[in-house]
Image (cartoon, rainbow, N blue to C red):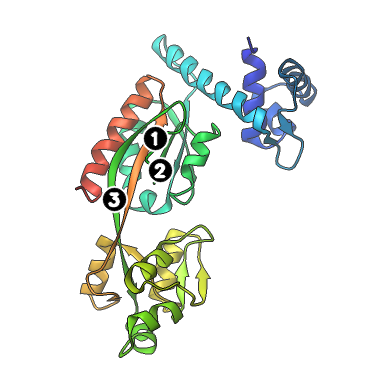
Amino acid sequence: MYDRERLATLSAVVEEGGFEPAAARLHVTPSAVSQRIKALEQQAGRVLVRRTRPCTATDAGTALLRLARQIAVLEGEVARTFGPATPAHLPIAVNADSVTHWFLDALAPLVAEHDVRLDLHVDDEGHTADLLRDGTVVGAVTTAPEPVQGCAAEPLGAMRYRAVATPEVVARWFDGRDPALAFPAAPRVDFGPKDRLQTRFVEMVTDRPCTGPAHRVPAADGYHAAVRAGLGWGMFTDVPARRETAAGQLVLLGGERYLDVPLYWQHWRLRTTVLDELTASVRRVAARALQQD
């Protein structure tokens, strides 16, 4: 059996990024943290923490880190049953557009009802399941339909995206041109290196690769502002795309063509009040906010 105190120390080192900040969080000395990690590594028979800046878990450490976090969730559930306890740490992975358009509405009732400390990890929806797999988060909004080992998965609906650009960008790059030639060449705005929405849309509409120059703006508000400023064309979710095209601020590209991105909610298979209510709230809000079959 692994010592609960040592597991909690492993979790603190990885979450805080080092031995000294972990010691401050645990109210012990850095030496005590080092001794606990060494004892845990001796018991496991392998290195668990990479002594880098920040400290990270090795593959073996990741397995124990997930165990540590599951124990913390269950202990917190029991502690709250008997009275006031430390706020529950609720790390969740979610894509930026979900945070902007609907996910916070699912979290608000949980925060109002329970003493929880949210820790949102914002990443591309195609990669959020990786954070669930390595034990960093307890739940994730993801495009992965197959449940991660030890997790449950359920469909939420789809986020609908439409290609838009300013009238000036349309006049310069698209007016009077075959979309198969215009889209691959026109400058676009990507959210970041993992963002393939624009590329997927171009391939769907033109059956050609998206080869134009790409500006990267990894911030939700900044991304929208970059498209509105005319840096290039980009993908907006359905509601703002239609609202701003109706106002004449932007122009729809590709006619009524759109790209639907199916989303799934994956979470640990742990039955706790907080996780159960979180899942119910995510399911309820997604049913209103996302495209349903």
- Toward the viewer: 195 or 147? 147
Q: Is residue 59 left or right of residue 194?
A: right
Q: Is residue 215 left or right of residue 167?
A: right
Q: Position of residue 208 (x, y in %)?
A: 41, 73
Q: Mark 1, mark 2: which one is toward the viewer?
A: 2
Q: CA distance from mark 1 to mark 2?
A: 9 Å
Tell me the residue that label 2 is attached to: 144
Q: CA distance from mark 2 to mark 3?
A: 12 Å
Residue 55 falls in image quadrant: top right
For badge 2, the amino acid type reads: Ala
**Residues tagged 1 and 2 counted as in contact (Cβ below 8 A):** yes
Q: Position of residue 43 (x, y in %)?
A: 73, 15
Residue 142 falls in image quadrant: top left
Mark 3, secondary structure of its residue: strand
Tell me the residue that label 1 is attached to: 266
Mark 1, secondary structure of its residue: strand
| First-in-chain label (1 vs 3) | 3
| First-in-chain label (2 vs 3) | 2
